[in-house]
Image: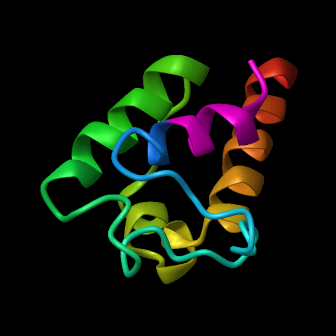
Amino acid sequence: MDVSNFIIGLLEKKNKIDESVDIETLNYVEKGYVDSLGIIKFVVEIEDEFEIEFSDDELADPSFKIVGELIKLVEGKIKNNEKN
């Protein structure tokens, strides 16, 4: 499955993302698409879907909460898994 579509689909479970929103720079936590309790479930769903694992440092990085940066991170991890 396409990483971008999967992540956007998870985010839209709660609220539809308006088409005027720049998805690349959207901070999904600040905008309320994922709350502090839902973040763990959100992360686990991504890890399970793509068979990857995020490090504590990656989870703590502010860029993790930006949709475009998260998509790049997941895609990079998938490529890295394919190499190994």
Query: Toward the viewer: 69 or 28?
Result: 28
Residue 15 vertical position relative to residue 32 in the rendered view, above or below: above
Query: Toward the viewer: 65 or 21?
Result: 21
The residue at the point 21 percent across, 50 percent down is 38
Report whether 13 appears left or right of 79. left
Q: Position of residue 7 (x, y in %)?
A: 59, 41
Query: Toward the viewer: 45 or 30?
Result: 30
Q: Seen from this angle, which residue lies furthest left?
A: 37
Q: Position of residue 52 (x, y in %)?
A: 55, 29
* Residue 79 image-quadrant placement: top right
The residue at the point 57 percent across, 58 percent down is 17
Q: Which residues are magenta?
A: 1-9
* Residue 67 image-quadrant placement: bottom right
Name the quarter where the N terminus is drawn: top right
Q: Position of residue 16 (x, y in %)?
A: 51, 51
Report whether 68 appears left or right of 18. right
**In the image, is residue 8 part of the stretch drawn in magenta?**
yes
The residue at the point 74 percent across, 73 percent down is 20
